[in-house]
Image: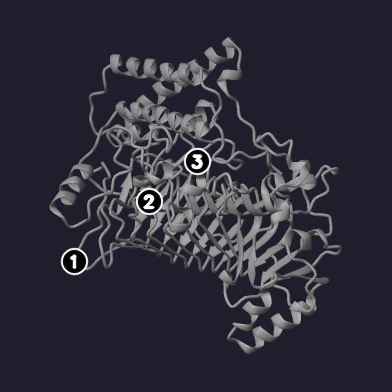
Amino acid sequence: MERYSTTDPATLGRQAQAEWLVQVGALTATTHSLNNASSNKTQSAPMSGTARCIRLLVLVGLLLVGIAAPASAHEERESQFPPGDGAVPTHRSIDQAGDVIVACKPDSADRIAEIADDGLRKFNKAMLKRCEYEHLQAAVDAVTVQRTNIYVLPGQYREEPSWDRKCTEDYDGGIVDYELIVSCGEVLNLVTIAGDDPDDPDITCDNQLCDLQIEGTGDDAEDVLFTGGFRKNGDWVKHNGLKADRADGIYLKNLTVELFRENAVYFHETDGYVADGVVARMNDLYGLLTFTSDHGLIKDCETYYNGDSGVYPGSSADVNAQNGNTGPLSRWSVEITGCETHHNALGFSGTAGNSVYFHHNDVHDNGAGYVTESVIGGHPGMPQDHAWLEHNQIYRNNENYYVNVQGDDAPCQAERPADVGYEDGIVCPAFPVPVGTGVMMNGNHNFVHSNEIYDNWRNGVMLFWAPAAIRGEYDPQAQTDNPNHNAFTSNQMGHGLPNGLDFWWDDAGVGNCWQDNLPAPGSEITHNATSPQGLPRCATGSQLPISNVVKTVQLLPCAEYNRETNPDPAGCDWTESPTKPGTQQAETIAAAGAHAGVSGGLGVIAGISLLAFVLRLRRRERRAA
């Protein structure tokens, strides 16, 4: 099991800080030499340029010393991976259940009468006779044996007893430890399933809630609706909808969860979980979120109108950390398939989204489609590695939700959450992303193969570098630990409608390759690779770890984004709608981007720039948290 920790120069003594800066300076000089050695030019950059680069990096180092370690994207207790000896749970029939408990609402009988399918209507009528609980949390609290099936009959579940339990009165808004989740999960959650004894030293499920199955019995997911919503004062009712915490073997099926301050459904430190046919919508941050969990399956889901991402497997168990291969996986921590994620700020995101098998999904009409990265601190399993994307449709991710936060009268600037308009599809982007991008990543050993990626007006796929210091890891030798050994192969690019640019790359990383990608008939693959040879093929891969300064500086202005205080940073074009490909303006922009290049020691400046960029981003995230 892995537990996350960082070393922040702000916590070091002055001598240690000085030693750290000297090490970084030495790394800078070494990188400069490597860049010159790999250049076709025989004349090296002047020593004065090297000295300037080192001084600039030391200056950034001093800035780092004065900044606290970045906060995580969502505030959470210190977490660890499960031992990994679990399994993906399978759906259980009523005859296979250890016990059966039923929850229903006063109007469930009327809703059941409207079910068209005779067999399903008959089953619901039989379950209605066994109903003892009006709220799901009460049904969960009534479980006495493992492998219990809870059937939730059609109706809207507001879970009012969870709103103001007496135990919530002293909660001060800080990070909640597991002990409090067990004793009073209502401080954050509408419904809590906590499976581990807080008094034992492990995180393994060992109580009656292990292998719990919660299943909606309606015609479709919307027939069983869990709604958080807002209090009379206009504030959110809860942070999370359903949270499964150390609840190994949990299976959720055929439910809709909506309107929460953070997450609709949250799996945390859980080994073995399934979300099957779940709809997660209209949340300020995430639809379906998992963190430090393993043996997961998310299938046939739908997520939309979420301010961060529809699906987020963050710090998924790093089961391939020692796997030096790029390509199909034999073991993954979470499989996501058959999902439609649309009209979110991000369709999918995953900080340290490791060993994610993402296939046969429909990702469309988001601000950006699939984003996985090694930027945000506080996440086990860094740097990100081994996502496998195959047979997905990733298209038309051009929705610009930044207009909802820009201007004093913008809907997301309302003082009360209840007045924003989440129910009407208002999305308030939590973080800056380049609108019009299909796939965006900066990890390692990611395999993007046989997808259809088209009609993304800015970039089809974007690969870039993020120095480890950004996430609070200051070992100089770790600063180029991404993006390396990523492969983009056999994807159909721009078929039907073109991308703005098929492949955007900042030239960083070792072992990255592009091969056998298929342009639309009569077209060519478009990219911005600096080398005259174009994008590296997989026989050789890319060679240099440091990014290209001209490309990198394009990212800098967007670091200042904050949806409350600076929703429209000067010089940031990420929050602007990109020009539709095929127009004269789009062709001019694409041509300029394709010719952006730099060689030699200036590549070091790119690293410095990106370092400063994401540090500003992290400060912004900390303020927004």
- In the image shown, does 372 or 410 lie closer to the viewer? 410
C-alpha span from label 3 to label 1: 37 Å
C-alpha span from label 2 to label 1: 23 Å
Q: Could you say which disc has been placed on residue 513 in the image?
A: 2
Q: Could you say which disc has been placed on residue 439 in the image?
A: none
Q: Residues within 10 Å of mark 1 (few under 14, many from 20)?
A: few
Q: Quadrant of residue 94?
A: bottom right
Q: Secondary structure at mark 3?
A: loop
- In the image shown, does 71 or 623 lie closer to the viewer? 623
Q: Could you say which disc has been placed on residue 374 in the image?
A: 3
Question: Which is more N-terminal, label 3 or label 2?
Answer: 3
Extreme residue toward the bottom, this view: 118
Given the image, on which type of amino acid does mark 1 rest?
Gly
In x, y percent, where is residue 276? 61, 68
Task: Please state, as top left, top right, bottom left or bottom right, where the C terminus lies in the image.
Answer: top right
Is 576 drawn above or below residue 45 in the view shown?
A: below
Q: Could you say which disc has been placed on residue 522 in the image?
A: 1
